[in-house]
Amino acid sequence: MASQRICFQLQVKPDRIAEYVERHRAVWPDMLEAIRDAGRCNYSLYLRDDGLLIGYYETDDDDASAAALAADPRTAEWEASSTDLFVSLSGDRADQSALQLREVFHLEDQLAALGE
């Protein structure tokens, strides 16, 4: 299966942006390892000044990756301590409630279709 490219959106509370940034300067080693072990790579977060957060990662199977993170005890404390940084969503965990964005363009895919 080809690697899936996943992009998602969340909203950090405006009064918690500095805290959010600071927490991500050095994510807990257990959390980093859990993300890696769940099969996510090339993971980046981008934050606009008003708190709009865009995340991107690649994985072979996003459903399996999400299930692995949800079941991993290493993620529970991080998620519990992070949830209140976000504008309320439908779930208890921001990582499971994030709005996924639909990819509409990928340069390499279109170049490959041209035979390059």
Image: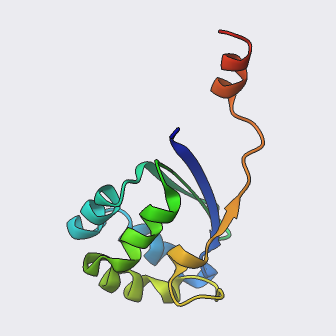
Quadrant hosting residue 47 = bottom right
- In the displayed orientation, state which residue is furthest to the front: 1
Quadrant hosting residue 39 = bottom left
Residue 17 versus residue 58: which sits nearer the camera?
A: 58
Q: Is residue 83 left or right of residue 47?
A: left
Q: Quadrant of the C terminus?
A: top right
Q: Is residue 56 left or right of residue 9?
A: left
Is 68 situated above or below 110? below
| Residue 8 place in picture, x, y as percent | 62, 61
Is 47 situated above or below 22? above
| Residue 64 place in picture, x, y as percent | 44, 63
Q: Is residue 54 left or right of residue 84?
A: right
Q: Is residue 21 left or right of residue 107?
A: left
| Residue 106 place in picture, x, y as percent | 69, 33
Q: Residue at x 59, y 76 (%)?
A: 12
Q: Is residue 52 visible?
A: no
Quadrant hosting residue 54 = bottom right
Is 13 situated above or below 113? below
Q: Is residue 56 visible?
A: yes
Residue 74 versus residue 59: which sits nearer the camera?
A: 59
Q: Residue at x 45, y 51 (%)?
A: 43
- In the displayed orientation, state which residue is furthest to the top: 116
Q: Residue at x 68, y 10 (%)?
A: 115
